Amino acid sequence: MHMAALGACGLRHVYGRLHIKPEELKEAFGRLSETGFIGVNLTIPHKTAILPLLNHIDPHAKIMGAVNTVHFKEGELSGFNTDGRGLARAIADDFGVQLGTLRVMVIGAGGGAGRAVALQCALEGCPELILVNRTRHKAEALAREIEALPAQSSAASRVTVLESDDAGLQRCLEKTDIILQCSSLGMNEGDPSPISSALLHRQLLVYDTIYSRETQLVLDAKAKGAKTSNGLSMLLHQGALAFEIWFNQPAPVAVMRAALLDYRKTSSH
Ligand code: NAP
């Protein structure tokens, strides 16, 4: 999607992949900075390991405690996090609503994706935030972190913590507008849904961050008549936001979306 974006904007750059081991990170970033790279996207485990190597960290990335986009400028390294904002744009795009107006249930609120998503919901001002995780103490730690956000950063979301098998799930789903599925349950063929289909209803919006397959949750939600979407749009928008940071111009989102969909089609054969 980045190569398509570069081509559409007439930018003569190349987006490629580099395999860098954790112990090579410092040396690699020194070299990338010296050799004219404009920026980098990072994935696990580098999203947190990069923090001490940066000259500047965007306030949003500071709250997230992780950086997925680095911009090299005048010999300095600036770090940003576009994952959460990418999700907010994806929800607006896919469902035509602002994330901050919704009562949200985050499933998998103990992993990396769930953390970024839940923090973004708080920053957007979601009135209700229900955190569900198989291992309860991880969701509780996240809830404490959200409650400790500076008042100006969050519009005081009401936070509730539940285990995935908690009987309270049904009660909470009655006051949920959108389910944001962030656990890895669904990645593998035959994985069950984290929520019993009997609890789903047609008024729910269901967003599964997994985009490599149609998960059981999405299939069940569709069968109930609920609106659904998957994490491809989050991937798209985090990439578009990174492009905007590197080139200080709007990203050609339609071109990037078409390239992503094309790639998916060809890679699934
Ligand atoms: P992670 O840090 O390893 O977290 C995994 C999460 O899934 C934890 O909350 C874990 O719960 C939960 N989980 C794992 N197996 C489970 C099971 N059998 N039953 C219930 N819960 C289970 O992984 P991550 O990086 O957050 O990624 C999670 C998912 O997000 C992946 O499927 C990935 O595809 C998706 N993702 C999508 C995007 C996007 O752009 N669309 C970006 C990032 C990630 P415990 O705490 O109990 O272990």
Image (cartoon, rainbow, N blue to C red):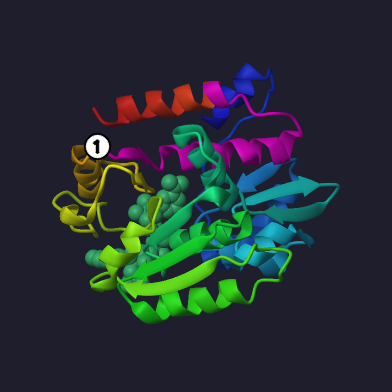
Is 130 one of the magenta-colored residues? no
Q: Predominant secondary structure in magenta?
A: helix
Q: Residue at x 29, y 40 (%)?
A: 226
Q: Residue at x 42, y 38 (%)?
A: 232
- In screen coordinates, is 28 left or right of 233? right
Q: Which residues are magenta?
A: 226-254
Q: Ligand 1 closer than 8 Å to the CB at disc 1?
A: no
Instruction: Compare residues 45 and 105 and report the one nearer the observer.
Output: 105
Which residue sits at x=74%, y=29%?
A: 249
Report the amino acid beneath label 1: Gly
The residue beneath circle 1 is 225
Q: Which residue, as the protein is rendered here, is positioned at the far right?
A: 74
- Mark 1, Cα crowd under 10 Å, few <14 / some 14-19 / many 20+, is some
Whether residue 210 is visible here, answered yes or no, is yes
Residue 46 in percent (x, y) is at 55, 61
In the image, residue 108 sits, relative to residue 42, either above or below, namely: below
Q: Quadrant of residue 147?
A: bottom right
Residue 77: where, in percent of width, then height? 76, 55
Q: Is residue 246 magenta?
A: yes
Dividing the picture into quarters, in which one does residue 227 lie?
top left
- Residue pictured at 17% horizontal, 49% vertical: 189
Q: Position of residue 87 (x, y in %)?
A: 52, 46
